[in-house]
């Protein structure tokens, strides 16, 4: 593959990654629209309708899922990935239901650092001095934010580390995004259906198809289906990007999502914007600016070497 092809793939991977984190960053707006539904019912239907979405895509694009199910290597990588992402979602839902929202926000900021670290350790990715400086600045921002919270963020660490490991597994496996997510959801959908039925029978918790005779009942049902689609879309984009660009670089882009969520909370929902938030964002965006400068320099250098060859 020539230099131009490599640059094209990298730019496409970066664009896909930014689109992924744009969707994830704006998801709080969607969750706000269905906050009356039990978070445990939401997690069940996220899995169920994510499964339906990716299976439809697989049928339309004629993906060969049977060979993936027969692949022992796929089971070694994708089965643990399914378990890890389910644990991540479950703890997130628990945190939200127990009003540990700040800890989830800290986790979103720690996660990119975990991703960068895994890229260095597992994939032997190298970073330039400017990128190391950016890591230092981002770390300082996360530490200042965590210190301002006032206690050790166990939930944050769990959310950040599990999603970081999930990303590393997906990159190491290297399977195409759609079939891989379909494989994972095949393992998760059975327990999700059982749990949704248990919730409805034993706790009376059911918004899905509960009152289709009213506009509001239809609205809640449709929104739960959309929740699954909005789960499948960024996961697909994430898996695609992870296969196309270095994990350490993907880590820097990940800061885009929590920053967007934070700004949405501040300007759309009037949430507090504290000094800790300002310090954190200042450090992180300073780091992202350095990464952008380093990327432009690298592309110019490659272009110069290509023209001189």
Image (spheres, rainbow, N blue to C red):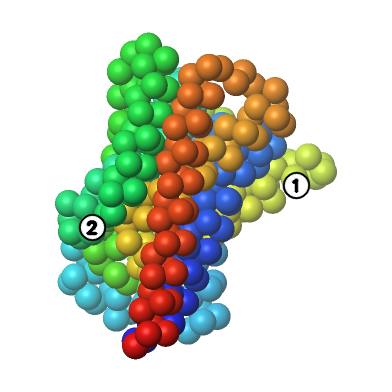
Give the residue at mark 2.
126
In the image, is residue 58 above or below residue 185?
Answer: below
Near mark 2 (Cα within 10 A), the count class, few <14, some 14-19 or many ≥20, is few
Which residue shows up at 64% across the image and 21% down it?
A: 271
Of labels 1 and 2, earlier in sequence is 2
Along the line of sight, which residue is nearer the eye, 129 or 125?
A: 129
Which residue shows up at 46% across the image and 28% down it?
A: 280
SS state under label 1: helix
In the image, is residue 197 above or below residue 175?
Answer: above
- Residue 40 location in percent, x, y? 49, 35
Can you say which quadrant of the picture contains the C terminus? bottom left
SS state under label 2: loop
Q: CA distance from mark 1 to mark 2?
A: 51 Å
Near mark 1 (Cα within 10 A), the count class, few <14, some 14-19 or many ≥20, is some
209 on left or right of 277: right
In the image, is residue 147 above or below residue 202?
Answer: above
- Residue 307 location in percent, x, y? 42, 85
Along the line of sight, which residue is nearer the eye, 191 or 30?
A: 30
Can you say which quadrant of the picture contains the N terminus? bottom left
Along the line of sight, which residue is nearer the eye, 289 or 93?
A: 289
Residue that protrudes farthest toward the top in the picture: 150
250 on left or right of 118: right
> How many numbered circles are shown?
2
Which residue shows up at 47% across the image and 77% down it?
A: 8
Give the residue at mark 1.
218
Along the line of sight, which residue is nearer the eye, 185 or 209?
A: 185
């Amino acid at each position: 593959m020539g230099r131009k092809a490599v640059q094209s793939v990298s730019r496409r991977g970066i664009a896909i990654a930014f689109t992924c984190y744009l969707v994830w960053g704006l998801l709080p707006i969607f969750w706000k629209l269905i906050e009356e539904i039990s978070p445990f019912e939401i997690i069940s239907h996220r899995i169920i309708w994510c499964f339906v979405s990716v299976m439809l895509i697989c049928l339309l694009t004629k993906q060969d899922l049977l060979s993936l199910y027969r692949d022992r290597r796929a089971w070694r990588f994708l089965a643990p990935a399914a378990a890890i992402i389910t644990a991540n979602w479950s703890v997130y839902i628990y945190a939200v239901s127990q009003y540990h929202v700040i800890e989830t926000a800290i986790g979103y900021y720690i996660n990119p650092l975990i991703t960068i670290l895994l890229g260095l350790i597992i994939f032997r990715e190298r970073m330039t001095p400017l990128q190391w400086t950016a890591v230092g600045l981002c770390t300082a921002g996360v530490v200042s934010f965590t210190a301002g919270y006032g206690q050790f963020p166990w939930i944050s660490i769990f959310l950040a580390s599990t999603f970081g490991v999930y990303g590393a597994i997906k990159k190491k496996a290297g399977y195409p995004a759609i079939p891989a997510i379909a494989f994972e959801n095949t393992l998760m959908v059975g327990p999700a259906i059982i749990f949704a039925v248990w919730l409805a029978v034993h706790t009376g918790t059911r918004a899905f198809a509960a009152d289709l005779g009213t506009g509001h009942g239809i609205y809640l049902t449709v929104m739960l289906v959309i929740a699954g689609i909005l789960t499948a879309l960024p996961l697909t984009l994430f898996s695609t990007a992870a296969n196309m660009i270095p994990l350490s670089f993907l880590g820097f882009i990940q800061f885009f999502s929590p920053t967007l969520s934070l700004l949405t909370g501040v300007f759309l929902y009037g949430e507090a914007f504290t000094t800790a938030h300002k310090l954190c964002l200042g450090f992180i965006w300073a780091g992202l600016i350095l990464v952008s400068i380093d990327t432009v320099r690298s592309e110019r250098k490659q272009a110069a070497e290509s023209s001189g060859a």
